[in-house]
Image (cartoon, rainbow, N blue to C red):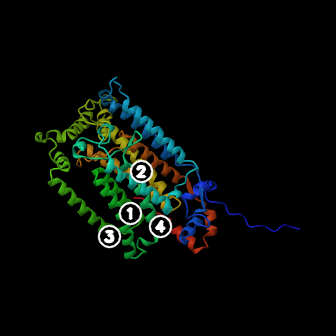
Amino acid sequence: MKKENKPEKPRSYPQLWRFNLLKVLMPGFFKGQRKNANEKVYYRYLQHVRFKQIDVAYLLLLVVLSALGLATMFSASYASSINITNDNIGYYYAQRQAIFFLAGFAAIAVLCTDVFDYHMTRSLFANGVIFGLGVLLMVLVLVAGKADPNEASAIAGDDAGGATRWLSIGGFRFQPSEFMKICLIFALARILSVNADKIGSGASRAEEMIVCIKCFVLIGGTAVLMYKQPHLSGMIIICAIGLSMMFISGIRFSTLMGFSAVGIVGAAAVVYKKYTENSYVTDRINGWLYTWDEANGDIAWQTRNSLIAIGSGGWWGLGFRNSRQKFLYLPEPHNDFIFSVICEELGIAGGLIIITLFLMLTLRGVKVAMNAPDRYGTLLASGISMHFILQVLLNVAVVSNAIPNTGISLPFFSYGGSAVVIQLIEAGLLLNISKQYFEKDSIEKEQKSAELIKVDRQAEPAPHSAG
């Protein structure tokens, strides 16, 4: 007698669910814990996600940029290293930076395995814990933070301005604002993905405005915490990342511009108030407007030497390690103004090559975002990619005096342990997203379910997300 054909047991989504301890981080995705019907549908949708090889091109670009960053940082920091060490050690900063790079790539190695899956951060519990930790650290830095120009974060004038951007825990110093950037990306990605059916042309204006209010509360609250430090460059990056993610999510342009106008007016009012109070903002703006005016004295010293470095390098540069401005003419040459040293040693051509590499990295990130298996992955990859390219463009604008000096570092190049480690973790998250794809044959069989079709359509990138 023939045995009856038993129904085939459905394959579980990712392999990592066999680790029961990880279930605590995903309370909405497991039997007996699902309280939201939409989460149940989302779980069914994820059952069709499969794993592939990571985006090797993105990883190679990351390795190249990191290697170039460490090499140029060694050259730019040589004079500063000798100046602060008693034994005339020229590789002090480079040695420390190399350790931070190793820690960052170790994190990438973990994020590229099956032990971690980016969907773990989508649940309200995990997302809230990450964002709450970021806010807690930002509040602590206002209470017990320090201005630390010796650790390559603060630029000239921060100490005098009373800036507090660093926390020291167990002898380890770091910038909470760097961690807060990725926290905001996580939070916005969740809000915009969970409310995907409430934004765009198919939703009502009222629903879309409510989603916008939620996002702007997070962006505005984070910007206020950075304003209190004060950390003007952090405010600019946070607002730019937030607006770009909202645009990519498909929110109507008119709605987005209406809310943005209020924020722009408010920011302009704050800057004008600071300018009239003869604060550090006054010095930055005057140093930008009247860079070569001798009456400005030390205010524009950094910017003037930055322009001298770029100009003296010409098209092809003076040669690697042959910079003159790094010998204590250009303050903190291994940090925010490292691009000036790059242009002096490698020329404008070398600077353009590095910018091109960042553009290629961004394009690969956009491709990963467009091929992500769900909207949450699309927004997460988009936010990370926008973070990198926006910070690069703003740094280049500062060192070339296109905008006032705001102390924006160059990703993977500027000295700073917390910044490098967080940036490499972000890149690791993007690589984790690049591993996943849909098994089309499997999902087509299941698309008789109206709910599954609805989730599938919501997971598609917005039409203008590629731009």
Left or right: 88, with 291 as reference point: right
Could you give the CA–CA distance between mark 4 and mark 1, rounded to whole angstroms?
Answer: 13 Å
Camera-nearest label, 1 or 2: 1
Q: Secondary structure at mark 1?
A: helix
What residue type is disc 4 on?
Val
Dot placed on the residue nearer the N-terminal end, 2 or 3: 3
Q: Is residue 363 visible?
A: yes
Checking the image for residue 362, the label placed there is 2
Dot placed on the residue nearer the N-terminal end, 1 or 3: 1
Q: Which residue is mark 3?
A: 254
Q: Which residue is mark 1?
A: 246
What residue type is disc 3 on?
Ser
Camera-nearest label, 2 or 4: 4
Dot placed on the residue nearer the N-terminal end, 3 or 4: 4
What residue type is disc 2 on?
Thr
Horizontal and vertical percent for residue 117? 55, 54
- Check the picture and name the quadrant holding the C terminus: bottom left
Callouts 2 and 4 close, C-beta under 8 Å = no
Could you give the CA–CA distance between mark 3 and mark 4, rounded to whole angstroms?
Answer: 22 Å
Q: Is residue 462 visible?
A: no
